[in-house]
Amino acid sequence: MKEVLSLWLPAVLWAAVIFALSSIPGLTSGLDFWDLLLRKAAHVTEFAILGALLARALGHSLPAVAAGVAYAVLDEIHQSFVPNRAGVPLDVVIDTVGVVLGVVLYAQVRERWLLRRPA
């Protein structure tokens, strides 16, 4: 039980952080183009972290990507109910890029760590 909790708790907590951020109405800085760029970079970053945590919890890349993309879809649906927010299909694509990036980076770091680990 302790091992399952240590694997899944970080992913669940990070998903909750994403949900909380998505619940903020009208999240803008008023910086026009820079605001758009920063928000899209935030999407990639937060979903890259989620992708890495899901890969760690699930132990395989493909299920982690599938779970991350499913969460991205649910996040956009959630945002469609938040005042001054919208569910944007392009954001699912951006989130997917983040998930894949996180899963790939996690796999690379894990592989390098395992190669350096004494037998």
Image: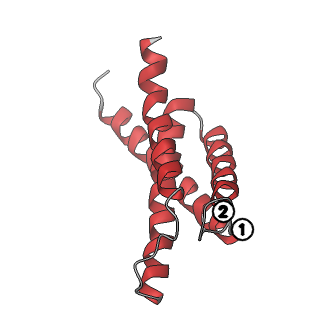
Identify residue for label 2: 92
Q: Position of residue 75 (x, y in %)?
A: 63, 54
Residue occupying the point 49% across, 80% down: 36
Classify 68 as above or below 2.
below
Identify residue for label 1: 89
Residue occupying the point 68% across, 69% down: 88
Q: Quadrant of the C terminus?
A: top left
The reply to whether discs 2 and 1 touch (Cβ–Cβ < 8 Å) is: yes
Determine whether, in the image, residue 6 is placed left or right of residue 116.
right
Determine whether, in the image, residue 62 is placed left or right of residue 107.
right
Classify 67 as above or below 40.
above
What kind of element bears circle 1? helix
Determine whether, in the image, residue 26 is placed left or right of residue 31.
right
Q: Position of residue 13 (x, y in %)?
A: 45, 37
What kind of element bears circle 2? helix
Q: Position of residue 66 (x, y in %)?
A: 68, 45
Residue occupying the point 67% across, 71% down: 90
What's the amino acid at mark 2?
A: Val
Q: Nearer the viewer, residue 72 or 23?
A: 23
Q: Residue furthest front?
A: 83
What's the amino acid at mark 1?
A: Pro
Determine whether, in the image, residue 85 is placed left or right of residue 3.
right
Q: Position of residue 67 (x, y in %)?
A: 65, 42
